Image (cartoon, rainbow, N blue to C red):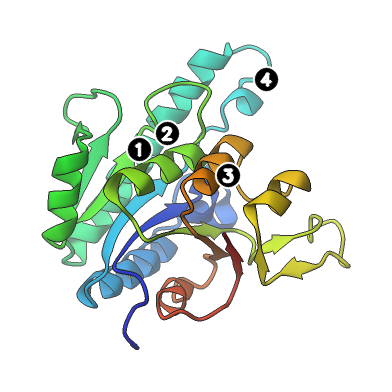
């Protein structure tokens, strides 16, 4: 491919995207396609960290249905992200990529405790680092974890791989006339309450001036296209 425009990126992948049409668990054919694409990025010299959501197993308070207290619900979500990272890490290893899991909370046997300096060393060694368990604290989403880890590792950009192909002024699944933005500012995202990331994550990204590229993961090669600098989704800055 053309020379990548980013040297180091943090890819945020929704848990639901990994489930495919099954909506829960994993579509391993699709997961393998995603992993092969990320492996190609690394082979082109791009350093890749990954944060995966847990929505294919647990959606926090929403799935708690008023029966599970918020802190417990969020911790269950952290465990869901750890399950996803373990599965994806093993797929990476099966296709010959170097990958490891780092966790924001201590879970013996699941992954090593997250350490910023060690994670950067791993990235520079060509390893794909999967950051599990969000920020390690309740009340913070994996969106916020993705921005936090991106800033900590000095990523050039956040690649937000979603089930939708960009940022719209309304939900395109409900409104066929919804307008897609090619580019939009953080200020406008916050002012219009657009569903890019949660407000904490958006504010953190804005304050630290890290760009976010939002695109659809349905076609995994979109990751490569974004790294080439193609404008296929929405750029937020």
Task: Determine whether label 1 and label 4 are within 8 Å by CB.
Answer: no
Query: Mark 3 falls on what kind of element?
Result: helix
The image shows a total of numbered marks equal to 4
Question: Label 2, on which residue?
Answer: 80
Distance, label 1 to label 4, CA atoms, is 22 Å
Q: Is residue 144 visible?
A: yes
Distance, label 1 to label 2, CA atoms, is 5 Å
Q: Name the quadrant of the N terminus.
A: bottom left
Q: Residues within 10 Å of mark 1 (few under 14, many from 20)?
A: some
Query: Mark 4 falls on what kind of element?
Result: loop
Distance, label 1 to label 3, CA atoms, is 26 Å
- The residue at 84%/64% (across/down) is 178
Q: Is residue 73 above or below residue 171?
A: above
Looking at marks 4 and 2 on the same chain, the residue that comes earlier in the sequence is marked by 4
Distance, label 4 to label 2, CA atoms, is 17 Å
Looking at marks 1 and 4 on the same chain, the residue that comes earlier in the sequence is marked by 4
Foreground label between 3 and 4: 3
Q: Residues within 10 Å of mark 2 (few under 14, many from 20)?
A: many
Question: Label 4, on which residue?
Answer: 65
Left/right placement of residue 25 relative to residue 154 reads right
Spot occupied by residue 201 in the image (x, y as percentages of width and height): 54, 40
Question: Label 1, on which residue?
Answer: 83
Distance, label 3 to label 2, CA atoms, is 23 Å
Q: Name the quadrant of the C terminus.
A: bottom right
Looking at marks 3 and 2 on the same chain, the residue that comes earlier in the sequence is marked by 2
Spot occupied by residue 174 in the image (x, y as percentages of width and height): 84, 56
Looking at marks 3 and 4 on the same chain, the residue that comes earlier in the sequence is marked by 4
């Amino acid at each position: 491919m053309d020379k990548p425009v980013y040297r180091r990126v943090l890819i945020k992948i929704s848990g639901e995207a990994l489930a495919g049409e099954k909506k829960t668990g994993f579509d391993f054919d699709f997961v393998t396609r995603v992993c092969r694409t990320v492996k190609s990025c690394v082979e082109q010299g791009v350093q890749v960290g990954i944060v995966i959501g847990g929505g294919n197993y647990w959606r926090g308070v929403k799935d708690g249905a008023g029966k599970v207290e918020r802190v417990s619900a969020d911790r269950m979500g952290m465990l869901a992200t750890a399950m996803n990272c373990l599965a994806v890490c093993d797929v990476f290893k099966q296709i010959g990529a170097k990958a490891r899991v780092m966790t924001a909370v201590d879970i013996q046997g699941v992954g090593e405790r997250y350490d910023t300096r060690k994670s950067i060393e791993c990235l520079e060694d060509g390893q794909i680092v999967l950051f599990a368990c969000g920020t390690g604290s309740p009340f913070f989403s994996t969106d916020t974890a993705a921005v936090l880890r991106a800033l900590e590792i000095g990523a050039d950009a956040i690649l937000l791989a979603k089930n939708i192909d960009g940022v719209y002024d309304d939900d395109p699944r409900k409104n066929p006339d919804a307008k897609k933005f090619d580019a939009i500012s953080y200020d406008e995202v916050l002012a219009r309450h657009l569903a890019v990331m949660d407000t904490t994550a958006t504010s953190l990204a804005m304050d630290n001036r890290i760009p976010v590229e939002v695109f659809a993961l349905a076609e995994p090669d979109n990751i490569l296209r974004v790294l080439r600098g193609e404008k296929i989704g929405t750029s937020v800055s």
